[in-house]
Amino acid sequence: MMSDLIDVHAHFTPPTTPEERKTRWHAMRAEQFLAPAPYHWTVEATLDYMERVGVAMQLLSNIPKTLDALRASNDYGAFLVSEHPSRFGLLAALPTDDPAAALTEIERAGGDLQADGFAVTCMYNGVSLGDASLEPVWAELDRRGATVFVHPDAYAPAFMGRPSPLLEVAFETARTIVDMLYAGVFRRFTNMRVIVAHCGGALPALAGRLHLLGAEAWVPNPGELDQGEIRDHLARLYLDTAATGTAHTLAPALAMTTPDHLVYGSDSGVPCSTETTLEANRHVLADFTGLPREQLEAIGHNALRLFPMAAARLGRQVAAA
């Protein structure tokens, strides 16, 4: 089995009351997420799971939808890292509906909070990551050579009677990355590294279509991207393995990018993941036959190149990505 894993896709929740958890549970059930009971994240249960299955470190993320809650969550995440520096890292959330606030939070999180990287939502309060207003945010992240984790909105409304985490997260991810592609984000900002959750969602399966048709004359293409540039920009993305450790997703991912751009992710710490599903995904990833054993096992450690401060807390020396 794969072990000593660096998990880039793990969530946390600041302390909540039973009443708050019950309110959120009812709201989720109203959107067809039929969880049988309120979800409760704890540090103790998380560390216990990590110890039992061989996860060396989790890079934690949580992206509340109000600025006050987001800042408080980042503070709590930084506290968790200070309490458990060799077990946790922080991907500080950014409020990408407000570029000025996002720039302030980048400065605060990168300074006082000593965040390892940053986390953003594909569609945050109605603003897509490809929106032109975010140009200064991407510029600052690029200046810092930051690693940015892109995650869809798993709490979006149900669609066709099914909860968002089942299907819509995959399509929202693909739509957003394609929007960023045509907006020129990946062309202009080559110094930052982007990890896309859930192995890129539907993006790898659509990458060949984008290569073939994306530069055709009938496609709006203000930056005049050509086929080679589309292919190169997609290949530079990093993809995590959260709930996507099977050949159904890994095969198209490897057609889009290279093995060293696959990083381990669990999707631990949210209601849609149970220990049963986390372990099933970890086992099927370990059994994947599409890579030599050495490259497959490297998936669990590739993230260390993206997070040098986390690597240092673990006492690891790694080459830069």
Image (cartoon, rainbow, N blue to C red):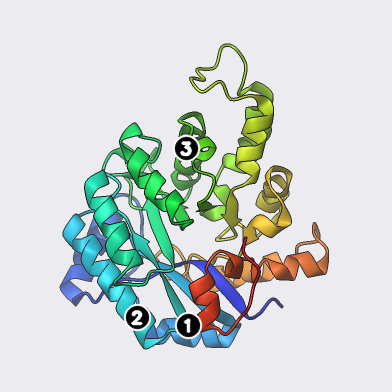
Mark nearer the N terminus (1 vs 3): 1
Mark nearer the N terminus (3 vs 2): 2
Task: Please provide percent x and percent y for residue 86.
Answer: 48, 84
Task: Please provide percent x and percent y for residue 67.
Answer: 20, 56
| Label 2: how many Cα within 10 Å (few below 14, some 14–19, many 20+) | some
Nearer to the camera, 31 or 82 = 82
Dot 3 amino acid type: Val
Q: Work out whether 247 lies above or below 160.
A: below
Q: Work out whether 2 lies above or below 223.
A: below
The image quadrant that residue 71 belongs to is bottom left
Task: Please provide percent x and percent y for residue 309.
Answer: 49, 74
Mark-to-mark CA distance, 1 and 3: 32 Å
Identify the disc placed on residue 80.
2
Indicate left or right for 251 with 167 as reference. right
User: Circle 1 sits on which residue?
Assistant: 87
Nearer to the camera, 295 or 99 = 99
The local secondary structure at tag 3 comes to: helix
Foreground label between 1 and 3: 3
User: Circle 3 sits on which residue?
Assistant: 185
Dot 1 amino acid type: Arg
Mark nearer the N terminus (1 vs 2): 2
